[in-house]
Image (spheres, helix red, strand yellow):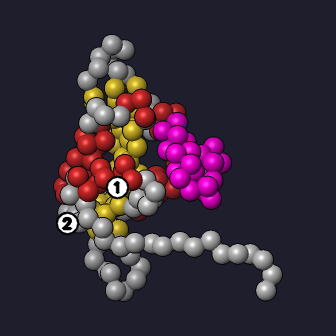
Amino acid sequence: MSATDTSVIICTYDSLADLKALRACIIEQQEFHRALESSWPEGNAIIDDYVIYLEKQCVRHDGRVIVAEYGGEVVGFVCVVASTNNESPDDPAPFAWVHDIFVKPAHRRRHIATKLMSEAESFARAHGAHVLRLGVLARNVVASSFYREHGFREYASVLSKTLDTGSY
């Protein structure tokens, strides 16, 4: 693809060609999350372990990392696994899970996230999934709105409270 090509290409992540770009996206995504939740670690501190984590999740749960290219550059990604389940016996049904979806801020508003999500849904459906879930930080209202616009509904909420660590 030429550097002047402005069409979005959605394709399967190539660990040889796309690793550096994927790492940059994950670091940028993590720093965005840190701005919302200061307890999250820096992107550079977790990048090696997180890439390994995503790769293992894909192997264990029939998953795939999918990238979006725009103008010859990787500008976003989604990681989806087709089959996972909760360990709790009260919610044992298998489901597909979106581990991450991210588009670099300079490339937003071009429907790239929509294309990535559509590809993740198609992948999950093709691999037998009937339900797709994901998590989103409560303070990430833009992402929450995007997910609702694409048919997601609130399924469960995780509430958090910082505990005073003073002596008792």
Residue 115 point in image, percent of width and height: 25, 40
Q: Nearer the viewer, residue 62 or 102?
A: 102
Residue that carries the numbered disc 1 in the rendered image: 144
Residue drawn at x 32%, y 81% is: 91
Residue drawn at x 52%, y 45% is: 32
Residue 156 point in image, percent of width and height: 36, 73
The reply, left or right, for residue 57 in relation to residue 34 is: left
Residue 74 visible somewhere in the drawing: no
Give yes or no for residue 44 being in the magenta stretch: yes
Residue 100 point in image, percent of width and height: 41, 51
Q: Amino acid at mark 1?
A: Ser
* Region in magenta: 24-46
Residue drawn at x 40%, y 25% is: 73
Does the magenta stretch mainly form a helix, a strand or a loop? Answer: helix
Question: Measured along the vertical axis of the image, is residue 130 above or below residue 29?
Answer: below
Q: Amino acid at mark 2?
A: His
Q: Nearer the viewer, residue 134 or 33?
A: 33
Question: Measured along the vertical axis of the image, is residue 82 above or below residue 85?
Answer: above
